[in-house]
Image: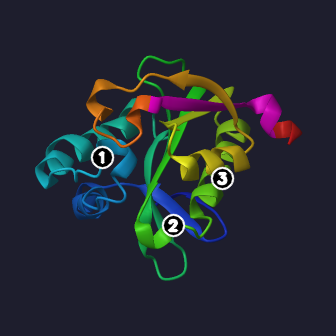
Amino acid sequence: MDTYLETGRLALRRFTVDDADLLIELDGDPAVMRFLTGGIPTAPELVRERDLPNVLAGYEKWGGDFGLFAAHEKDGGAFIGWFHLRPGPEGPPDEAELGYRLRQAAWGRGYATEGSRALLEKAFAELAVRTVWAATMAVNHGSRRIMEKLGMTLADTLPTPSDMEMVEGSEQGGVRYEITQEQWKQR
C-alpha cells in the first residue's frame, strides 16, 4: 500500500482501479448519503464508470499532491472511508477543498477530525496552499462541528444545488467554512 499520509490511527492512500467495491459499499449506505442525496445510494455502475475514473484522473491532474484518498485503520487495515484535499474545478491551486466521507462504523471515533487535521497540516506545510475550505449542508451539524474543531470559521452561506433539493433540510442551504495558512499557524 503506497501511503499518501499517516496519522496516529489512520493511513491514507491513493485509490486504485481495484477499489470500486469499497466505494460502492460506502455510497450504498443510505445513512452515509443522507446529506448528499437524501439517502439514495449511488448506483454501482456509476461508481465504476464515473466516480472511480474521476478519482483516478485527479491524481494525474494534480501530480499526486491532491486528490481523494482511501482511509484505513492502521490497526487491522479496515477501510473507514475517504478524505479529499483538492483545488476546486475553477479555483486557484493555492485554494483547496477539504472533504471526507466515512462508513457508519467509523463515526464518532474522531477519525474525521484526525484525518482532516493531518491534511490541513500537509496543505499548509508542504503544498503551499493559502486557504482551505469545506462545505456542507447547513443542517449537517456533525460535519460543521468537525470544521469548527479544526479551527475553520464560517465564511459564507450557499444556495442548495438543484440536485440536492431532496435532502432533508435543503431549504436551509449550505455553508462554507475556511481557514488560512496564517490562521492555521496561529492556532
* Residue lying at 37% horizontally and 57% vertically, measured from the top left: 32
* Residue lying at 84% horizontally and 38% vertically, measured from the top left: 185
Whether the residues at callouts 1 and 3 have beta carbons within 8 Å, the answer is no
- Which residue range is magenta in the image? 172-184
Q: CA distance from mark 1 to mark 2?
A: 18 Å
Secondary structure at badge 1 equals: loop
Residue assigned mark 1: 38
Amino acid bearing label 1:
Gly
| Nearer-N-terminus badge (1/3) | 1
In the rendered image of this protein, does residue 152 appear above or below residue 146?
A: above
Measuring from the top left, give residue 149's x and y in whole percent.
72, 50
Measuring from the top left, give residue 60's x and y in whole percent.
37, 35
Residue assigned mark 2: 107
Q: Is residue 182 magenta?
A: yes
Q: Nearer the viewer, residue 109 or 114?
A: 109
**Lateral position of residue 181 relative to residue 24, left or right:** right
In the rendered image of this protein, does residue 172 appear above or below residue 44?
A: above
